[in-house]
Amino acid sequence: MRAAYIHGIRDIRIGEKPVPVPVGDEVLLRVSAVGVCGSDLHYYKEGAIGHARITQPFIAGHEFAGRVVEDQPALGLKAGQLVAVDPAKPCGQCEWCHRGHVNLCPHVQFLGSPPHTHGAMTEYIVVSPSQIYPVPDHFTPVQAVMLEPLGVAIHAMDLAGSKKLFETVAIIGCGPIGLCLLQLARMMCKKAIYAIDPINYRTEKARQLGADEVAADHAAIAEWTDGRGVDLVLEATNSPEGFQIAAQSARIGGRVVLVGIPDGDQYAPLSASLLRRKGLDIRLSRRMGHVYDRAIQLVAQGLVDVDCLVTHRFDLQHATKAFSYPSEFVDGALKTIILPNAEQETDS
């Protein structure tokens, strides 16, 4: 079968590997669609995220959906059935798993995470039953894929305090996860949502999805709030300045949730007194917990529109474009999708 390997910085090649054979209770899936995540772009542009470094040809892709290859009576799954997949397989035994923080498990096996676990940019993959989430019959493969980035946004909102109503919210960074955050924020914001991104087509999408004000520069937030700042800042950029921008945009005593991964895995220097004197509540978000069921409900009920975030689809042979378009902001790219078995997916 074919797979897209990252060999080095901006070097993607299509290679061959054997179709995986399920072991034990594993399930073989034919991969229907794979999203290119911001973390995948870091591997493509930098070859690493912090200590997670590509040391050999690597198959990326953790946002994906697939079809069951053979009937799985014990799981209630039929051949051809579309399922979403949680890329994380936590150990279930450590202190953090026992506390319910499975996203922080230090022993997690995470698909598409170098150097140890290949991802789904390939034609077939095996996964554990615990990772499988059947989706409603009317879901498309792309909708099933988008449950993963939506899940990241749901987890971030949980950290923010999703049962609390905020008067004002700022979204810093209007990529796919930022735009998911915006749609979730509409459900818990009483007054105004502000969206900041230097790319015009992204802020236009934010406006379409319900942002009350949009701008390229965060300085506009001070103007909109008469210098007060906002109650909640959700930062979802790849900018080293993202943390600083978020801190400057928050009000005294405000809350900041950092979701994005900065280029180079480093934040720009930041004044400690800015954080201290404002008394900011700062929370860092990593991946997600058990949120797939909630993500499925939000999409099924039409409360979150994930289809509008997907701008480009490519077959596996053109995987490089799926990476280069969003990394270079080509042709209004937001979320790009790879279809490893495009000829067999007519509803993607």
Image: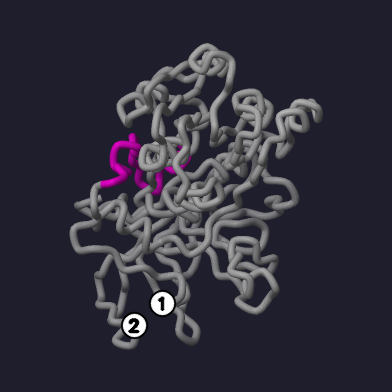
Label 1 or label 2, whichever comes before in sequence order: 1
The magenta stretch spans residue 321: yes
Q: Are dots 1 and 2 in contact, CB under 8 Å?
A: yes
* Quadrant in the picture for residue 46: top right
Q: Is residue 210 left or right of residue 347?
A: right
Q: Is residue 189 above or below residue 73?
A: above
Q: Is residue 292 left or right of residue 101?
A: left
**Gap in Å between the C-alphas at discs 1 and 2?**
10 Å
The amino acid on which the numbered mark 1 sits, given as a three-letter code, is Val
| Start-end of magenta stretch | 303-322
Name the foreground residue: 193 vs 327. 193
Tell me if mark 1 has few (under 14), some (14-19) or many (20+) residues whose alpha carbon lies within 10 angstroms of its own. many
Q: Is residue 212 above or below residue 148?
A: above
* Element under disc 2: helix
Q: Is residue 294 above or below residue 265?
A: below
Q: Which residue appears at 42% of the width and 28% of the height?
A: 193
* Quadrant in the picture for residue 256: top right
Could you say where residue 61 lies in the image, as x and y percent from the top left? 50, 53
Could you say where residue 119 lies in the image, as x and y percent from the top left? 52, 59
Q: Is residue 257 above or below residue 223?
A: below
Q: Which residue appears at 65% of the width and 23% of the height?
A: 248
* Element under disc 1: strand
* Residue underneath mark 2: 75
The amino acid on which the numbered mark 2 sits, given as a three-letter code, is Leu
Name the foreground residue: 210 vs 267. 210
* Residue underneath mark 1: 27
* Quadrant in the picture for residue 243: top right
Tell me if mark 2 has few (under 14), some (14-19) or many (20+) residues whose alpha carbon lies within 10 angstroms of its own. few
Q: Quadrant of the N terminus?
A: bottom left
Q: Which residue appears at 40% of the width and 61% of the height?
A: 123
